[in-house]
Image (cartoon, rainbow, N blue to C red):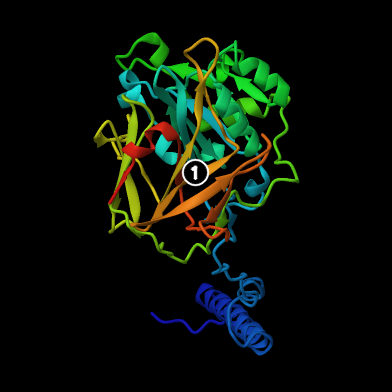
């Protein structure tokens, strides 16, 4: 039976549904109206906070490469600003034949000097402008007389393991060289089991030296009087050849038993280093050493009174410069102990050197007839 009773349960339920629907209608209408209002004030849509974020673009990343400064030892633009004003670090490297295959880190040096020390053998002085980036270096041996002056000319921090007490130490004190002796700074070095005798097992590294030099009472910035670069370098992008002729190979003898030679690699535009006629390779990497510039400086080498240790006259002389598979004769002078080398062409005009790593061989003029170039 159907009832038409406005006061019954069905009537009350219907009224409730109508009220509920009306409330929902107002809510939906209100939200739509609010949204329309928001749309007027924010045409792009979305909430105000997110729209504010979108309207503020993040700064664009710089496309410029970081500016680098010129390395005073190589003429290359490869140093972070400020490093060019730091003192280079010069490290004595063992070059006795028994330790040749244990040498490492020499190829990372910006410039290497080689000259006689005693008994017909040479040592190397590997020099780094940015020592913090240097790898493991060694094996490290004791300081010698001629290298004291070479280090001083660069205003370098001179590092060795001990020294010749009879000739080097008095000269070091006379010159006032800041000498960092690893015998007194053991934390800056370490031993490696490389199959050699104990005296051929000492190494250091750029990381250890950086950490320990920072703790030492050592001046870290180069003296103001030193030239900005050690050579008169050509711009890094230039590649200059020399007028003396072709130089695909070069050989220099330091004594009857020790010599260095170089072979030009035209693809890399560098000279590959050889020692004893065999490739001069890095102990850790196996890579053959290579440099862009080779200097051979002839001078008088004399013995000290002990008849064993020697010194090289670093006042002036003549020699050769090789680069880019070419060479020419040069003159050189140094003068006072703190002075850098000055190089000129045979006509006296300044020698312009290609930017890059260099090897400087300072040889006894008595062995000049053994010098070969071709």
Q: Quadrant of residue 47?
A: bottom right
| Residue 109 against residue 145 in the figure, above or below | below
Q: Quadrant of residue 49?
A: bottom right
Q: Does residue 95 appear in the picture of this structure?
A: yes
Q: Residue at x 75, y 46 (%)?
A: 225
Q: In the image, residue 139 lies at what x, y percent?
A: 42, 22
Location of mark 1 (residue) = 110
Tally the marks. Answer: 1
Q: Between residues 329 and 114, which one lies in front from this camera angle? A: 329
SS at circle 1: loop
Q: In the image, residue 258 lies at what x, y percent?
A: 34, 27
Q: Between residues 262 and 8, which one lies in front from this camera angle? A: 262
Q: Between residues 338 and 306, which one lies in front from this camera angle? A: 306
| Residue 205 against residue 55 in the figure, above or below | above
Which quadrant of the rendered structure holds the N terminus? bottom left
Q: Between residues 139 and 250, which one lies in front from this camera angle? A: 250
Taking the image as shown, residue 221 lies to the left or right of residue 76, namely right
Q: Quadrant of residue 96?
A: top left
Label 1 packing within 10 angstroms: few (<14), some (14-19), many (20+): many
Q: Residue at x 50, y 76 (%)?
A: 10
Q: Residue at x 38, y 38 (%)?
A: 368
Q: Does residue 75 appear in the picture of this structure?
A: no
Q: In the image, residue 204 lies at what x, y percent?
A: 49, 24
**Please, which residue is most extreme toward the left here?**
278
Q: In the image, residue 170 lies at what x, y percent?
A: 67, 16
Taking the image as shown, residue 258 lies to the left or right of residue 13, namely left
Q: Residue at x 28, y 53 (%)?
A: 248
| Residue 282 against residue 244 in the figure, above or below | above
Taking the image as shown, residue 279 lies to the left or right of residue 35, namely left
């Amino acid at each position: 039976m159907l009832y038409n009773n406005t006061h019954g349960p069905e009537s009350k339920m219907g009224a409730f549904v109508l009220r509920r629907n009306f409330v929902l209608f107002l809510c939906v209408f209100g939200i739509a109206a609010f949204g329309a209002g928001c749309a007027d004030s924010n045409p792009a849509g979305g909430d105000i906070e997110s729209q504010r974020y979108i309207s503020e673009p993040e700064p664009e990343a710089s496309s410029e490469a970081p500016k680098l400064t010129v390395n005073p030892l190589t003429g290359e633009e490869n140093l972070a600003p400020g490093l060019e004003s730091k003192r280079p670090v010069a490290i004595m490297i063992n070059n006795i034949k028994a330790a040749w295959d244990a040498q490492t880190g020499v190829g990372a040096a910006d410039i290497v000097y080689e000259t006689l020390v005693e008994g017909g053998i040479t040592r190397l002085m590997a020099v780094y402008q940015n020592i913090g980036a240097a790898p493991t270096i060694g094996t490290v041996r004791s300081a010698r007389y001629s290298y004291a002056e070479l280090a001083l000319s660069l205003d370098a921090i001179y590092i060795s393991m001990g020294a010749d007490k009879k000739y080097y130490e008095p000269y070091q004190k006379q010159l006032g060289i800041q000498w960092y002796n690893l015998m007194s700074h053991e934390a800056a070095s370490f031993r490696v089991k490389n199959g050699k005798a104990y005296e051929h097992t000492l190494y250091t590294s750029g990381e250890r030296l950086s950490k320990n030099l920072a703790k030492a009472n050592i001046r870290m910035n180069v003296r103001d009087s030193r030239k900005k670069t050690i050579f008169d370098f050509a711009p890094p992008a230039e590649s200059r050849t020399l007028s003396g002729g072709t130089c695909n190979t070069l050989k220099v003898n330091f004594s009857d038993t020790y010599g260095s030679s170089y072979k030009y690699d035209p693809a890399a535009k560098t000279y590959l280093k050889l020692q004893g006629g065999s490739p001069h390779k890095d102990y850790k990497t196996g890579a053959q050493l290579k440099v862009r510039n080779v200097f051979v400086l002839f001078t008088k080498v004399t013995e000290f009174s002990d008849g064993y240790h020697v010194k090289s006259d670093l006042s002036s002389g003549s020699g050769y410069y090789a680069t880019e598979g070419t060479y020419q004769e040069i003159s050189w002078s140094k003068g006072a102990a703190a002075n850098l080398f000055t190089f000129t062409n045979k006509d006296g005009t300044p020698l312009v050197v290609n930017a890059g790593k260099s090897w400087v061989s300072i040889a006894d003029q008595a062995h000049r007839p053994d010098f070969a170039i071709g």
